[in-house]
Amino acid sequence: MSNPFSGIITPAMKTMFTNALDALHASDGGTVPCRLTFGDTSWDQCPNCEFDALRGRSKNEYNGTGPLAFTAGICPICHGEGRTASTTTETIYVIPMYKKSRFIASVPVDIIENTVQTQSTIDTFASIKQAKTMVLDTDMEGLTTNTYTRFNEPQLCGFGDSSYVVVLWTRSA
Ligand SMILES: [Zn+2]
């Protein structure tokens, strides 16, 4: 007996599903904002003091425009370093799945508690692959900060094509 459902998954239907998922993945759909943090730290010249280019550090003189004026001692912003560190971050929108039974794609058997799977659109792939940590749902940060570390490599999936990225994260703080 032939499968009564065979042949019903038409290209038009795949497009319809993909469009529906795209709407869900939009920033005003079913997503929450999350902040990716990358491992690289960049150095910016201190905004508060005069920089001594010869010695490669602060002259410990207020530059007249910085946020914290000082007259004596070392610069209170950079502590005499002349530079301040900044970690690169990026906000993306993801759909978080908290229940293991709702995870999609291949899930490792050694998955531990406090693991969340995020689903997002294909354009987040490169950022996720480079990310070290993620703060999930930054709208909640006034109440609680949920920091996760990436557990596996991001995987591509989709309905007939690779339109989405799924990846697992383990709660770290
Ligand atoms: Zn300074």
Image: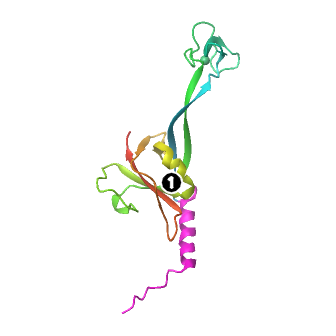
Q: Is residue 139 visible?
A: no
Q: In this picture, which residue range is highlighted in magenta? A: 1-29
Number of numbered callouts drawn: 1
Q: Is residue 59 above or below residue 106?
A: above
Q: Nearer the viewer, residue 44 or 29?
A: 44
Specify the quarter for ligand 1.
top right
Q: Residue furthest right?
A: 64
Residue 110 in the image, given as x and y percentages of width and height? 29, 53
Q: Nearer the viewer, residue 153 or 144?
A: 153
Q: Is residue 2 above or below residue 130?
A: below
Residue 108 in the image, given as x and y percentages of width and height? 33, 56
Which of the 4 image quadrants contains residue 27? bottom right
How dense is the environment of label 1, judged by Cα within 10 Å: few (below 14), some, or many (20 and up)? Answer: many
Image quarter where the C terminus lies is top left
Left or right placement of residue 105 versus residue 41 in this view: left
Residue 26 in the image, given as x and y percentages of width and height? 57, 58
Q: Nearer the viewer, residue 127 or 36?
A: 127
